[in-house]
Amino acid sequence: MTSRSVSKTVVKRLPVYLRILDNLIRRDVEIVSSRELSLESGFSAEQIRKDLAYFGAFGTRGTGYNTTFLRDKLLKIIGLDQKTKIIIIGAGHLGTALARYNAVNNPYVDIVAIFDRDRRVIGQKIEQIRVLPFQQAPEIIRRYHIKVALITVPAGSAQQVVDEIIKHGVTAILNFAPAKLHAPEGVHIHNSDLTIDLQSLIYYSTAEEERLLRLQQETEETKSQKMLKLE
Amino acid sequence: MTSRSVSKTVVKRLPVYLRILDNLIRRDVEIVSSRELSLESGFSAEQIRKDLAYFGAFGTRGTGYNTTFLRDKLLKIIGLDQKTKIIIIGAGHLGTALARYNAVNNPYVDIVAIFDRDRRVIGQKIEQIRVLPFQQAPEIIRRYHIKVALITVPAGSAQQVVDEIIKHGVTAILNFAPAKLHAPEGVHIHNSDLTIDLQSLIYYSTAEEERLLRLQQETEETKSQKMLKLE
């Protein structure tokens, strides 16, 4: 392990390991081999050994990793050894679903507040979490040192919301708004775009080859009609 | 363009182009350059020209692409030129949010039904879509030739649900259940794991370098205590 930053693909695998370990620990499994981790995760055993060794976690030859030890190590690596305080901006259907899901199923986060601009939802509680007016976000972000925010507002207001919360200290944003957001260096924005996921899936649901062939024919026809020119 | 299958990374970019074009068309923009597409998407202009040329869509030198022509081409490529019939399994908070979101904002899909096992939700309507008992899923899948399903059931029942719907004709699944699912060849499963997205984001929210250095020190200490052996 070095102090250099870790590649994004590795960072994405760590929570997968964490979930598998959580499940094993719940089932009182004390030792897990890299082969078992491979079966559960779909990553190769070699990859797993490499990832974990990089963070200084080594199994015992022929036996494997101590599940609790490895879980605790991963929590520290990811930064989940203390509950992460997060906020959600947007108390619509998706914001509500995310609040409920994480409040019930995610032991590693603490949703401090949900913000919205709609008076009809302000003042409501979602799983004991208050829906506050968005104007209060700066104050809450500063008071609770919030670094992480989930954005589930309409595309049109997402950038404005992001600019505002970054100004007050948020550095990591999980964006569900269907918009490309801009942020200064040092701020991480991860776009979780459910429509785009669905559409790329639809691509695979129909006979891919047949469709591409048909399109190829059309293109040839169009070309011969000289309706298109090369850029 | 060939009839060979298209790489996954290209397929993921296509819906992004589609969204940008949809927005441009709404604003009555008729022509867009690859440079503008690059600014909006974050992909390089070269990449965009390559992607689109692969599908037989060529811009006019010095001007760009006709937005409507390119949009219609992309719809055909992705398979969205006809509304895709989809089902949602699981009428919990997330299933409801996805149903509402897509019913309102996604003109390319038609949610035929939502299925659940909970009698308290069966019979309800979410944006005019009926919540049906899961036992009826096989019949609906066959009757409407459903190929695409969204899964928002608990992790414990996800595999069983997937096995059942695949048997009746579903070939593409967007899985929100926090579980690794297995499917026969030819079936596409895309995992959209909101907890894992959030946790890898949390990794970036705290001072990465500092944490890694601290862990490195701990590892050295542990090593010297000989509590760990190399695998």
Image (cartoon, coloured by chain):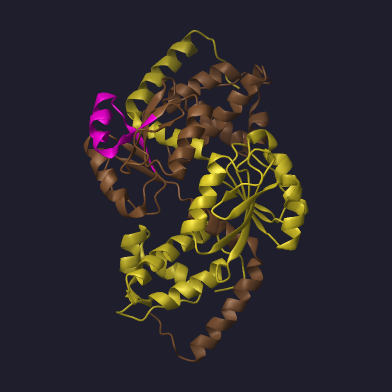
Chain colours: A yellow, B brown
- Taking the image as shown, residue A92 lies to the left or right of residue B6, namely right
Residue positioned 59% across, 25% down in the render: B21
Residue at screen point 36% across, 41% down = B120
Q: Quadrant of the N terminus of chain A?
A: bottom right
From the viewer's side, name the closer residue of A111 and A28.
A111
Residue B30 falls in which quadrant of the image?
Answer: top right
Q: Quadrant of the C terminus of chain A?
A: top right
Residue B70 image offset from top left, x and y in percent: 54, 21
Residue B213 x/y as whole percent: 62, 76
Q: Residue at 60% across / 64% down in the picture?
A: A84
In the image, residue A196 lies at what x, y percent? 50, 36
Q: Residue at x 49, y 13 (%)?
A: A223
Q: Where B121 falls versus A141 (above or below)?
A: above
Residue B96: name its quadrant: top left
Q: Which residues are magenta?
A: B130-151
Residue A140 in sight in this render? yes
- Answer above or below: position of A203 versus A17: above
Residue B162 part of the magenta segment: no
Is residue A197 visible in the rendered image? The answer is: no
**Is residue B144 rendered magenta in the image?**
yes
